[in-house]
Image (cartoon, rainbow, N blue to C red):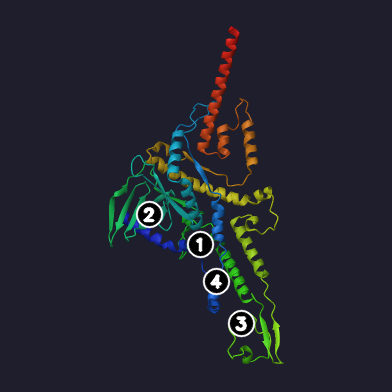
Amino acid sequence: MTDLDEALRLSRLLSRERKPLEKNDQYLDGEQPLRFVSHELEQQLGYRLSPIVLNLALFSVDVYDNRLDIEGFRVQSSQRTIVGPDGAFTRDVVGNSSADADVRDAWQENEGAFISQQSHRESLALGRAYAMVGGGDTRDDAPVITIESPFDAIHEDDPRTHQVRHGLKRWTDPDKTKWMTYLRGDGSSVTWRQKGRDWTEESADATDANEQKLCALVPLLNDPRVLGRYRTGKTDQRLGRSVFHPILSPLDALNKIASDMMVSAEFHALPRRWATGLDETDFMDDDGKPISTFSLVSGRLWGTESKEAKFGQFPEAELTNFHNTIKLLMQIVAMQLGLPSHYLLFQGDNPPSADAIRSSEAQLVKRAERKQTSLSTRWEQVQRLALMEMGRAADARPKMIETIWRDPSTPTIAQKADAIVKLVQARDNSGRSVLPIEQAREDLGYTDIEQGRMRDWDQNAIQDAQLAAAMRDLDDAAGDSV
């Protein structure tokens, strides 16, 4: 099978996956159709039946996305520090500051904080997103890192290694020209253009294989399954699942109950009145013209000359039964998403204590940590590709790069600082601190730039102290000579 045949097959697979992706996209935007409503009822209510969407799908994406912040990357040196049998260090190299700087510069050049947030939201909402790495316009330019939508890109894994075997990205220009890039598992790629019916290869856009044989299309999956199977209208679960996948039915039920509540409020906003013993003339004004419907609904007919007429009023509707049902469904949603109860504002007026908040968020934090673990490997592959584009293949080997995440829990600054200070002050038998001051500053959340300024200040302080001591020695010597 040729590369073009494989690309066209992946293109058909991408088209097949479009329907379930559109369904998740509708739920994310709050545009899903109203469920659990009969067709006859929709016809009778007409324009009065306007769905009320409680967009907990978007809320669930925001909750997890807020805990998936990348702070940077760390590149380990190609020479590692080894501890000998006697416990002594046989090498002094502990890091690769130049590679760290290159990765940081490329990440900032590509607005890494923004594109990582974009990709995480797409992955959480649609089940997957993609990152692509390519060379800049010139040799001196930084590598280009882009985020691709699952509507435009797809991949397949190797059944033996479960690594990306190949992938496809396609797009259409405003002039209806179609493009398709086939990315091989070794890092090379080929691009075709279609203007009419035939596909034409664009040799100028082709790329060669990279040193680590790593595909330039990196999937960022959310909750993928090992076994995937195609079912009509269902996504291939090996390609990831939306974070709100388990709550679709409760969401439909929530919107149905909320819409029913508004319909009930529409028909019972004013108390319904009844009257007996009236004829058609009672519903006409002094000129013999019928009273308008609005006048009737507003209750302008208060009296009649008929002695047999009787008036009454139906009790207004109570909507509390809708409130209780909505509350129950939202609690089910919170349980399935691992959300603490105070996130959905059902605990009364008194806010929970700080300790209670941290305890209730334990399951949510653990799920966020699991997502960080699965995404770390993918983002490290992105940085490996970036390093190879910069000609640093030796630093782009597996397990040489580490993703630095922001703590997904919510500790107070005082608690965190107190724990770190205690570790810095603790000493071993040789007098060394358990936690170096540089690591303490990183754990406290200071950026690389801030840590660099602190090192400069430390150095200046040391030099100032040494200079002051030297000046005192000179003063003492001068005094003795006198």
Is there CB contact under 8 Å for labels 1 and 3?
no
Give the labeled residue for mark 1. 29
What element does badge 4 sit on?
loop
Vertical order, 265 against 430 (above or below): below
Q: Residue at x 48, y 58 (%)?
A: 126
Q: Earlier in the sequence, mark 2 or mark 1?
A: 1
The mark closer to the camera, 2 or 1, is 1
Vertical order, 420 against 314 (above or below): above
Say what amino acid the circle numbered 2 marks: Leu
Q: Earlier in the sequence, mark 2 or mark 4?
A: 4
Is residue 145 found left or right of 330 in the rendered image? Answer: left
Q: Is residue 87 visible?
A: no
Say what amino acid the circle numbered 4 marks: Ser
Q: Earlier in the sequence, mark 3 or mark 2?
A: 2
Residue 342: x and y in percent read: 65, 55
**Along the viewing direction, whichever of 236 and 292 lies nearer the viewer:** 292
Give the labeled residue for mark 2. 168
Give the labeled residue for mark 4. 50
What element does badge 1 sit on?
helix
Question: Could you tell me how far apart the alpha carbons at marks 4 and 3 are, in whole angstroms?
Answer: 25 Å
Give the labeled residue for mark 3. 295
Say what amino acid the circle numbered 1 marks: Asp
How many numbered discs sit on the rendered protein? 4
Is there CB contact under 8 Å for labels 4 and 3?
no
Is there CB contact under 8 Å for labels 2 and 1?
no
The mark closer to the camera, 1 or 3, is 3
The mark closer to the camera, 4 or 3, is 3
Residue 189: x and y in percent read: 34, 49
Q: Earlier in the sequence, mark 4 or mark 3?
A: 4
Q: Residues within 10 Å of mark 1 (few under 14, many from 20)?
A: few
Q: Earlier in the sequence, mark 1 or mark 4?
A: 1
Q: Residues within 10 Å of mark 3 (few under 14, many from 20)?
A: few
